[in-house]
Image: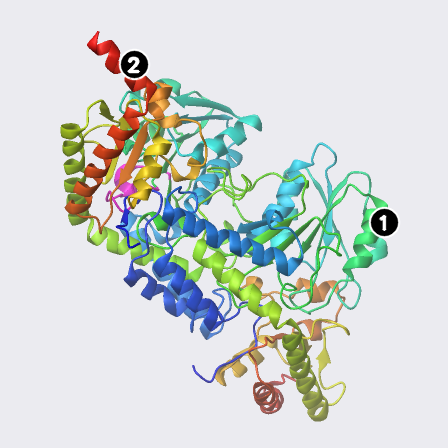
């Protein structure tokens, strides 16, 4: 267990030790309900306020635009259903890409049953939205456009500024949602510059706890609340706040943003080690890189000809190396990745695709041990 | 200044028990896998969730596949109500609830009313009880959902849930109960109760915040609440809060094991408080039934007094209590629960909720009574209403 090499940081991450210490402190000493008027309630409320300020600062927005949720999926559900339903009198057309996370695609599917017309726009070979055809589909009735900023399977970084400007030019009333669950804390995200209306983020992808996320909602955005009740989160998301986890989230956000450049250089280096080792051993044609050029370097999607991803994964696991075959949310399904399929990759590449996702906590030695393992495993498990 | 600190607001939230936190820690440190991942770390997380689900099911007398984890009690209530209403809207659009529900039930119901559903609010008597005959009469052919809370968060009234659920069942209507306050105080068994949906929240029984659960009887039509990955049998997507779920199961297990002793402890404290307050402070009423109430709940109205001032002065003496529901404590409106049991506005304003917990002692009770006697006398001295009252009674 101690020697485990964890290269599945896009599925979830290990909590930073500092985060654990901080959560432990809150669990043990600050247990009040932030809504209570007494001293213990006030203490909890202070923690909540400070957390909100920290998260707001990482995104360069105002604290009253940050709403805490139970995770990235809730943030995406709230963003999409909340915007669509709040604006349904203006129009019922919503649009997204084919390379989204299931928590976006399934919301679109659900909204079809409520009478919305949901459009799924294609991607190019690199997994990025085809901006021209995306914009073409936007019309006067389009109330929501949603896209993923860093793709969870390939690391492709959407050209967000260009895309947003084009959407605004076509229909300035269309609300723009960004699923930034994989981007947050990995690449700089300045929402003062990036003109999105609503952005989803999650704690457990940045070495924070599971069960906590947030939604940025730009002031004056029309959206309906997701949870009705006691009126927490400015009446938009009722329920007693998960104070220890929120503080853990803020602590993780602070650490990861202080190290954003160091981490980026680190994962860049790890990626280049893996690629140069594989180039040396397998040569071009001996393996494929499915992640596009200029993608986020922390996510590297590759496949080996005539190798089944599941089999490769199991062999790696036997050597305590953990990678995945794509999104954790669909890894029990054993189906072809919809993201790679949307990129039009041939079957031999999609069936063999593994996703390696690094974090700043990984080391060069781990990258080398990983490539050594691949060199010995891959030739053994080729089915042809 | 090292003041006394007495926490008597356990209905708002509880601290987390050390053994519960210990059970959670491995899943916040070494066992961090995503339960949907198929390798060892993922399987360990999945196993922990499965065990927690079975544990909670055993406590409730349910099947593990009838337990769905949520992000809070509020989410469980929202899901139960909106999910049942949307899934059954073709059958009808009428919903029945009571006038004294928690806002996590009242607000989703109001939301549905604005969306075109019809709502009947059942009245309650002076102690907060729903009359089963009223429910019987209110059910119509197009009624699709009844939601009545198990135990009230402000006045502790315990409803005759078994009887109410039986009435709904006879008419083929889905019955939901918000058991957020009951859980940990009452040994809840869903088979015995005959409810279809039941909500709970871990942080009310010494478990962590940010995790709750909805019991969904097999066969009940309920729409999914979060769409995305296939978690919670496709009804509630999102990476599971593994440590929170483990903590909730550990807390519930402890609660069930100790429930009789815990109840006895709470009842002793509540009785002592009620007796002493009645003995030493005039013009006070106990809200809710003296006996059929949550064992740790005491709710008083002190005449001629502003509840807010009372709370503030208690806080200065280190007593952490509440005027009603924590969720609405920022609001100046009198409690909808106290108004529903027939209290006039000015008396509803002077109310105080004390909810005891595990660590409270008889000395705490005596200290609270001393404080109350002193503060109430002081506030009444400053009250023109009280002055008028005294003059009238002299004349």
The answer to which quarter of the image holds residue B10 is top left
Q: CA distance from mark 2 to mark 1?
A: 76 Å
**How many tags in the picture?**
2
Residue sitting at x 78%, y 41%: A173
Residue A226 is situated, as x and y percent measured from the top left of the image, at 55, 42
SS for dot 2: helix
Q: Of circles 2 and 1, which is in front?
A: 2
Instruction: In this rendered view, identify the residue nearer to me: A155 or A161.
Output: A161
Would you say residue B365 is visible in this rendering?
Answer: yes
The disc at residue A321 is none
Residue sitting at x 22%, y 6%: B395
Give the magenta-colored segment's residue range.
Answer: B180-197
Are there few (<14), some (14-19), or many (20+) residues within 10 Å of tag 1?
A: few
SS for dot 1: helix
Using the image, determine if residue B362 lies above or below residue B20: above
Question: Residue B182: within the magenta?
Answer: yes
Residue A135 is situated, as x and y percent measured from the top left of the image, at 83, 51
Using the image, determine if residue A117 lies above or below residue A344: above
The residue that mark 2 highlights is: B388
The disc at residue A136 is 1
Chain at tag 1? A
Is the residue at mark 2 from the same chain as the one at mark 1?
no
Chain at tag 2? B
Residue A278 is situated, as x and y percent measured from the top left of the image, at 68, 88
Using the image, determine if residue B176 lies above or below residue A75: above
């Amino acid at each position: 267990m101690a020697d485990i090499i964890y290269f599945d940081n896009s599925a979830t991450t290990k909590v930073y030790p500092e985060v654990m210490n901080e959560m432990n402190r809150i669990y043990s000493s600050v247990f009040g309900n932030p809504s209570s008027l007494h001293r213990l309630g006030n203490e909890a409320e202070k923690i909540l306020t400070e957390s909100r300020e920290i998260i707001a600062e990482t995104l360069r927005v105002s604290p009253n635009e940050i709403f805490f949720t139970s995770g990235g999926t809730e943030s995406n559900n709230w963003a999409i259903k909340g915007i669509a339903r709040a604006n349904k009198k203006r129009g019922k057309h919503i649009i997204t890409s084919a390379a989204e996370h299931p928590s976006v695609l399934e919301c679109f599917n659900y909204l079809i049953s409520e009478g919305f017309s949901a459009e799924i726009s294609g991607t190019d070979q690199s997994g990025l939205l085809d901006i021209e055809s995306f914009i073409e589909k936007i019309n006067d009735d389009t109330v929501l456009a949603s896209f993923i900023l860093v793709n969870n399977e390939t690391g492709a970084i959407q050209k967000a500024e260009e895309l947003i400007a084009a959407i605004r030019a076509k229909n300035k009333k269309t609300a723009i949602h960004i699923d930034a669950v994989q981007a947050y804390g990995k690449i700089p995200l300045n929402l003062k510059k990036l003109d999105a209306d609503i952005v989803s983020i999650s704690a457990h992808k940045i070495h924070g706890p599971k069960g906590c996320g947030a939604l940025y909602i730009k002031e004056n955005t029309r959206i309906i609340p997701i949870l009705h009740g006691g009126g927490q989160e400015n009446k938009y998301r009722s329920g007693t706040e998960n104070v220890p986890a929120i503080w853990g989230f803020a602590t993780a956000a602070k650490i990861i943003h202080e190290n954003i450049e160091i981490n980026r250089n680190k994962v860049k280096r790890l990626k280049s080690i893996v690629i140069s080792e594989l180039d040396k051993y397998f040569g071009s044609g001996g393996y494929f890189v499915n992640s596009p050029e200029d993608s986020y370097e922390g996510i590297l999607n590759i496949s080996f000809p005539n190798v089944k991803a599941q089999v490769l994964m199991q062999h790696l696991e036997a050597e305590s190396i953990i990678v995945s075959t794509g999104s954790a949310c669909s890894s029990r399904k054993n189906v072809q990745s919809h993201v790679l399929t949307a990129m039009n990759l041939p079957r031999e590449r999609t069936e063999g695709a593994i996703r390696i996702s690094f974090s700043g906590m990984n080391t060069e030695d781990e990258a080398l041990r990983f490539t050594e393992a691949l060199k010995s495993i891959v030739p053994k498990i080729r089915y042809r | 200044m090292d003041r006394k600190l007495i926490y008597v607001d356990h209905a708002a939230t509880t601290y987390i028990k050390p053994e519960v936190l210990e059970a959670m820690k491995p899943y916040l440190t070494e066992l961090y896998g995503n339960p949907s991942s198929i390798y060892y770390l993922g399987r360990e997380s999945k196993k922990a969730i499965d065990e927690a689900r079975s544990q909670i099911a055993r406590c409730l007398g349910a099947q593990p596949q009838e337990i769905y984890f949520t992000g809070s009690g509020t989410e469980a209530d929202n899901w139960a109500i909106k999910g049942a209403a949307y899934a059954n809207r073709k059958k009808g659009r009428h919903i029945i609830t009571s006038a004294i529900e928690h806002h996590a039930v009242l607000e989703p119901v109001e939301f549905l009313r604005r969306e075109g559903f019809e709502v009947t609010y059942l009245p309650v008597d002076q102690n907060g009880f729903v009359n089963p005959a009223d429910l019987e009469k209110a059910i119509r052919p197009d009624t699709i959902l009844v939601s009545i809370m198990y135990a009230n968060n402000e006045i502790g009234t315990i409803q005759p849930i078994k009887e109410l659920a039986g009435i709904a069942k006879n008419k083929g209507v889905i019955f939901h109960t918000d058991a957020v306050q009951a859980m940990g105080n009452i040994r809840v068994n869903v088979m015995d109760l005959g409810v279809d949906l039941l909500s709970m929240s871990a942080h009310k029984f010494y478990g962590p915040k940010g995790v709750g659960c909805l019991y969904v009887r097999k066969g009940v039509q309920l729409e999914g609440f979060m769409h995305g990955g296939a978690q919670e049998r496709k009804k509630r997507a999102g990476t599971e809060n593994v440590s929170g779920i483990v903590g909730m199961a550990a807390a519930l297990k402890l609660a069930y094991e100790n429930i009789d002793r815990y109840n006895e402890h709470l009842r002793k404290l509540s009785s002592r408080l009620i007796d002493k307050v009645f003995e030493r402070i005039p013009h006070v009423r106990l809200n809710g039934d003296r006996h059929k109430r949550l064992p740790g709940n005491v709710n008083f109205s002190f005449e001629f007094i502003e509840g807010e001032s009372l709370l503030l002065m208690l806080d200065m003496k280190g007593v952490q209590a509440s005027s009603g529901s924590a969720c609405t404590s920022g609001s100046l409106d009198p409690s909808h629960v106290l108004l529903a049991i027939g209290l006039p506005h000015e008396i509803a304003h002077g109310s105080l909720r004390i909810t005891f917990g595990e660590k409270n002692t008889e000395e705490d009770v005596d200290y609270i009574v001393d404080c109350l006697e002193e503060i109430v006398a002081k506030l009444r001295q400053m009250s023109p209403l009280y002055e008028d009252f005294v003059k009238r009674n002299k004349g």
